[in-house]
Structure formats: structure tokens, C-alpha cells
Amino acid sequence: MKIILLIVCIALGFSFSASADNEFALLGGLRSGSAETSLNNASVSSKTSYQAGALATLELMHPWALRTGIIIAGRQVTVGPTNQGNVDLNFTYVDIPATILFRFTDIAGVFAGPVIAFNQGKEMTCSGSGTCGAQNVDSVIYPWQLGVSFRFASQMGGELYYEYHSGGLDKNVSNLKTVGANLLVYFE
């Protein structure tokens, strides 16, 4: 059901009237996240994860645009030491950004706003135990992003961003902070 809702949202986004300033792109990137833990004597280490998807930049009123799409994103960290050894959290989300882009030139701009992220996978591995599982994982989280978007060729571009989620990822991990970079391939 979540996937159907996501597809409908993306279809609505792509149904905006065709304009010369609307842009559509495929993206792939890396992200590195850190967080805080409520476990005594434990800390959170950052891990590098991935993201891939489609992105649309839809003009609202020049120079403002809506930046949206559908992105599969990994949110991964390591917590340790715990009673079960080091615990790797490997969560997968489907993200729908609802950020506003301000274009200060035709090839660059800044964006900020919320992302609606639907949990699709909550894999955990423990170095000191054969069994461990995520507890109280929210099925939907609402991180905020701040970033810069730019083109360096006619159909190639990039993004650098910072993302913050003040809530929890699971029972013991919260306040996720992420930095990321995306490569964009535009098609018209």
C-alpha cells in the first residue's frame, strides 16, 4: 500500500504542466549518518550508505521551484558496545522530498524543507549474538534537508546536502544527522 501511495504522489508531481524550467533527473549518491543513543556506555559510529531514485524540480514562480521525487535511501549506523556486541542498523526508506528550491542562477540553487520517509526494511546484525532485532521502529519519519544543487554539464549535475531527523530511528537511536552527495543525470 505504501508503494502505491508513493507512485500516486510522484505521478501527481510529474503531471504539473510542462514548462521549460521543469527538470527531471535520475540520481544516485552516497550518504553518511551519525546519531545519538540512549544506551549507557555506548556510542554511535557513522556508516556510509546509498540512495537512488528519480527527482523532479517543478517551477512554482521563478526563481522558486518544488523539488520532489521518489528516492530509495539507506539510513545506517553502528551502535556499540552493547550486551550483544556492536549492532549495525541497516534501515531502508522510500523518501519523498517536499523541499523548496531557490535558483540563484540557471545552473545552481539552494533547497530546504521536509522529507517524508517510509520505512521499507529494518535489518540489524549483532557481532556478539546471533539474534537481535529492531524495536519500536517508526514506519514514517520526517527529516529536514538543507542543500545546494548545481549543474556542471548540460545533462549532468550534483547535490550536496545536510539532513536532520530529531526523532528516533528505533528504541535506542535518535537525532540522526546525515551528510550526502548525489550525482544527477537530467533528461528532457
Image (cartoon, grey):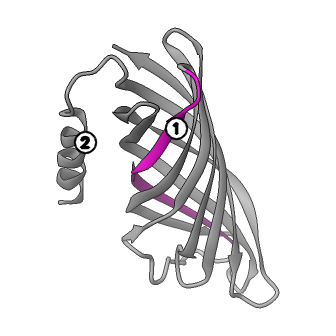
Disc 2 crowd rating (10 Å Cα; few below 14, some 14-19, many 20+) is some
Q: Residue at horizontal 42%, vertical 46%?
A: 72
The part of the chain drawn in magenta is: 86-105
Q: How many marks?
A: 2
Q: Nearer the viewer, mark 2 or mark 1?
A: 1
- Residue 77 in the magenta stretch? The answer is no
Q: Is residue 1 left or right of residue 85?
A: left
Question: Which residue is identified by label 2?
Answer: 10
Residue occupying the point 19% across, 39% down: 11
Between disc 2 and disc 1, whose residue precedes? Answer: 2
Where on the picture, by quarter, is residue 93? bottom left
Q: Quadrant of the C terminus?
A: top left
Q: Which mark is residue 102?
A: 1
Q: Is residue 2 left or right of residue 46?
A: left
In the image, is residue 97 part of the stretch drawn in magenta?
yes
Give the side of residue 71 with respect to residue 102, left or right: left
